[in-house]
Amino acid sequence: MSRAFVKEADENPTAGDIPERPLPAHTNYVTPHGREQLELRMHELQLQREQLKAAADSEALAKQKLAEVERDMRYYSAQIKRAIVVDPAAQSRDAVYFGATVRIRSEDDTEHEFSIVGDDEADVGAGKISWASPLAKAMIGAHLGDIVVWKRPAADTDVRIVAIHYPDA
């Protein structure tokens, strides 16, 4: 077979660019803990990069992984530079703001509790939602007892704010 018909990407799995991780268009608010998490993740990636550099000279898979780690480093570096730390302990306690832990009751009387955090801290399974999520946007500014409309893809639903907590200073 002629070499003219062999794609470079077939020979080198890293020949194609790895797509960049998109940065959110909105402000990167973070809690103090969120800032620490960003810096810790950056440190972990730096260590991974050093380990992969040695293997990348001889292994195609290591080159691919190195490219992914360097892409992630660019993302976290940008997120750290864009970070605006908001201390939840300093927030007003009479309404829902960034950093609040909020308990809501839905129309069917089920209760859920969520902490409003930065994008990179968000983990719905752990009860942490991004401040830019539809639920957080609906709750921000609401007071205890208020009913807010949670705009969901399935259907909008009303939820009542039944508790608002902030960490102690």
Image (cartoon, rainbow, N blue to C red):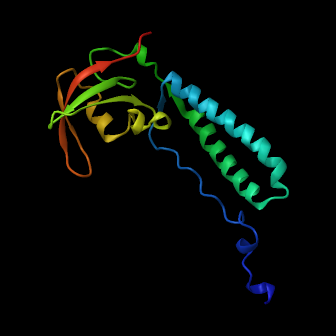
Q: Residue furthest top?
A: 169
- Which residue is at a point 63% across and 30% down the rendered structure image? 40
Q: Is 37 drawn above or below residue 64 in the view shown?
A: above
**Displayed quadrant of residue 16:** bottom right
Front residue of this view, candidates 34 and 162 = 162
Q: Quadrant of residue 35?
A: top right
Closer to the camera, 37 or 96? Answer: 37
Q: Is residue 118 left or right of residue 35?
A: left
Outermost residue to the bottom: 1
Q: How many marks?
A: 0
Q: Quadrant of the N terminus?
A: bottom right
The percent coordinates of residue 39 (x first, y second) are 62, 30
Q: Nearer the viewer, residue 30 or 11?
A: 11
- Image point (42%, 33%), residue name: 126
Measured as percent of width and height from the top left, residue 93 is found at: 31, 14
Q: Position of residue 104 (x, y in %)?
A: 24, 29
For residue 153, side relative to residue 49 (left or right): left
- 111 lies above or below 23: above
Residue 67 position, x and y percent, is 70, 53
The answer to whether residue 61 is above or below residue 125 is: below
* Residue 20 against residue 114 in the figure, above or below: below
Quadrant holding the C terminus: top left
Camera-side residue: 143 or 126? 126
